Amino acid sequence: MKKIIFTLLLGFTFIGFSQNTLIPDPNFELALIDLGLDTLPINGSVLTADIIDETDLVISNKGITNLTGIEGFIALTELYCDFNQLTSLDVSNNTALTTLFCNSNQLTGLDVTANTALQILLCDNNKLISLDVMENTQLNFLNCFSNQLTSLDVSNNTALTLLRCYD
């Protein structure tokens, strides 16, 4: 009986430490390899244990089209994914984010309503048609120029000290 329990515990421990986060974009995975968060070969995944405690991620200008897998970076406070080719970005799991640079992509939508700790948001030079920052009450710096916004409500953003919204 002790042998069975030990085997089960060992199996659960091994499974728990070997969970992977899917990274379908090879350029995203290569950027993680360059940062030492993954190893070759490119296989479409990264060990979740290797990314779960990361607080900042700089993956600017890497030709990334898909950031699926970013949800595994649950401790992330700073994300720099600007100057890529992203058309969508889901940061709803990254609730600790205080800084997000996603400018100069091809984003048509961006939902930051779950990112209530967000203080700096640069989402300029995209194709956004709407942007809801009502829940981002700690936001103090917002660049959203050169998008396709028709309106922007910053009435809840009392900490806002710099707003750049033109073009």
Image (cartoon, rainbow, N blue to C red):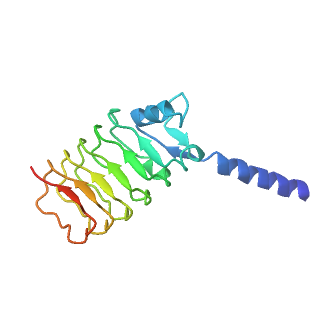
Q: Quadrant of residue 156?
A: bottom left
Percent x, y of residue 94: 43, 56
- Residue drawn at the location 41% of the way across and 37% of the way down: 28
Percent x, y of residue 32: 47, 36
Q: Note whether 89 is above or below 82 in the view shown.
A: below
Residue with the most extreme bottom position: 156
Q: Would residue 90 be visible to someone looking at this image?
A: no
In this orientation, which residue lies closer to the viewer: 148 or 156?
156
31 left or right of 41 in image: left
Q: Note whether 62 is above or below 147 in the view shown.
A: above
Q: Note whether 75 is above or below 133 in the view shown.
A: above
In this orientation, which residue lies closer to the viewer: 6 or 109?
109
Which quadrant: the N terminus?
bottom right
In this orientation, which residue lies closer to the viewer: 146 or 164?
164
Residue with the most extreme top position: 41
- Residue drawn at the location 55% of the way across and 31% of the way down: 39
29 left or right of 19 in image: left
Q: Note whether 36 is above or below 160 in the view shown.
A: above
Percent x, y of residue 9: 78, 55
134 left or right of 36 in image: left
Percent x, y of residue 23: 46, 41
- Residue drawn at the location 49% of the way across and 34% of the way down: 35
35 left or right of 4 in image: left
Q: Quadrant of residue 150?
A: bottom left
Q: Would residue 73 be visible to someone looking at this image?
A: yes
